[in-house]
Amino acid sequence: MANPLFESFSGSDFVENVVMSVDELFPFKEDLNQELHEDVDFLNISYMEVDLQRILLILKHPANLYFTGSLYVECLSGAVGVHGFTVRPGCDPYFVVSGYGQSAKCFSSIGDRKISVSLSELEIELSKRNIFKLFEDQLEQMCAASCVLILSKSGDNDLPILDMFKLPKFQCFEISRNSSFSYFDKLEDWLGCIFDFSSGSRIPQKMKYDQSIRNLANDCFRWEDPRVMICGGKGVGKSTSLQYLINRMFEKWSAVVVIDFDIGQPEFSIPGCISVNLIQKPILGPYFNNFYEPLRSIVIGHVNLDVCLTKYFAAVEELHKYCSLNQDILNFPWFINTMGYIKGFGLPLIAKTNFLFNPTHVLQINSSTEPNLNILPLTPENIHEMLECSVLHNSFSLFDCDFRIADNYSLISVTAQKLKNPVFVPPRVSREIRVISYMISNGLSSESVIISMKLGHKSQKEIKHYNRNKVIAICIPYYKRSFMQCVGYGIILEREDDIVTFQTPVKEDIFLNETDLDIFVLELGLRNSSWDGINLKYPNHDKEHEDIINLGNNFSNFDFLF
């Protein structure tokens, strides 16, 4: 069944264009405040083939085109929103990944009278790509749109981690779809993605943004240096909301600071660490593949807060000190990502973080399906009352009784979207895929450096945890050796007595130039993962001794194994 408004004709033997008159293409009068009805997307979206791997996509406001899969997008004229980020002309193509454990993203038209398709701009952009002649007859149609985009097919090497989802234990990341009719059959064949309208049933789980979060982003623009603290239980959408807010901030700032205190499912690193990150490009990939080299990362070593509470609190204070003294980040917006604890230890954590960072806004996300994850609104008064009750019924010997908190912030309380077909990714599986993604995206292969290290400076009780397939953090000490700054990660290949051998994608220069390197096991609860899909290489014990380079440092000896 074809769209009755579209007629197809062959512009050449290789190019198929979907065309119509301007009135047929855009039958509605422009209304920037118009609500999206069922058929608006269907009428306001059209596409034309450029070649076998590129599509020209035309959107007229209001329009939302959802998709799952991966592709490149570039804007020729006008502007389009993707996960909060505004894609404009003049930029290199952005790589966008949708689905894979998250709701589907969409290309959303922007209802701003200042944003429109420019004929001259369109002619220039089409000419630069040597496709002007191909679409010369459709220029008037395009100029009636809100934006004109080129979508390009991604390659197998653009996101190597996707191959991992063929393994049975990662089936929860599979992209599901209904077998209903799709107007986008050809588009899906060309780009290898799945597309759907807002009201369609082809993609069952679509990403929506609460208006309160949109308003929060708008309110941040009134500040020179907004500070937003994000709180909520596990699985309520903190990660998605954080990504959206980060992307919105690029409308005003060139970078965003994220202080990530979630040791279980951090945004930009492997679990078991807390970090300060300077984000300088939009977050358009899957949540498990957004890795950045942090400004500062402190190893906690565990994902269970109960066994590392003292260390965790000290590290939180240390990161606050670092942020406060770093002049390079003071004029950017800060987002403080808290753990998924909202009760018990969670309240002192929220109070402590609130007091240290003095936020301008607190975003509280409540669960729509598990009321036991929710608490009263996080107003200063409610926090004080809940803390007094917690202290009365529990032993918080690690905390001061003076739970001072900032009291001049704006509280934004939202309820997470209730999904019909939610994708549930167990935390253990999510942590494992983050580790694999880090190793693969950073180039871990059989050619990566292999290190042999003597653990003589550690106790026997510690050494017994350094077992095969455990993840380690590679660290250097700072601040009088009170904290360990993480510079990378690796996987243990084997241990013999107090000699541990591990492989890492970290460049060998780190080991050559740093004299105080040490390693720490990260207890991630991965149940001795076999690391399927990572090409690890076990050392050859028959190698000649001259193939080993001994490196001295203040802790122990490293050996390079080539």
Image: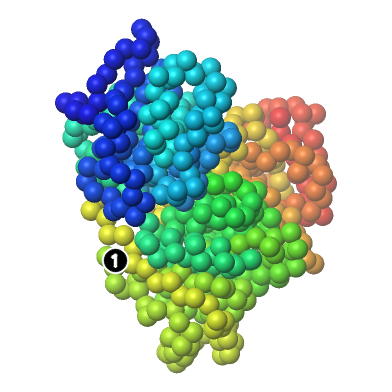
Q: Residue at x 30, y 44 (%)?
A: 29
Q: Is residue 484 above or below residue 362?
A: above
Q: Is residue 10 above or below residue 179?
A: above
The picture quadrant where one finds residue 91 is: top right
Measured as percent of width and height from the top left, residue 103 is found at 35, 48
The picture quadrant where one finds residue 124 is: top right
Can residue 496 be seen here? The reply is: no
Viewer-nearest residue: 458 or 220? 220
Can residue 337 be seen here? The reply is: yes
Q: Residue at x 77, y 33 (%)?
A: 548
Q: Is residue 280 above or below residue 228?
A: above
Q: Residue at x 65, y 33 (%)?
A: 448
Viewer-nearest residue: 7 or 495? 7
Given the image, on which type of amino acid does mark 1 rest? Ser
Local crowd size for mark 1, using a 10 Å CA cut-off: few (<14), some (14–19), many (≥20): some
Viewer-nearest residue: 422 or 455? 422
Judging by the rendered image, the residue that carries numbered circle 1 is 368
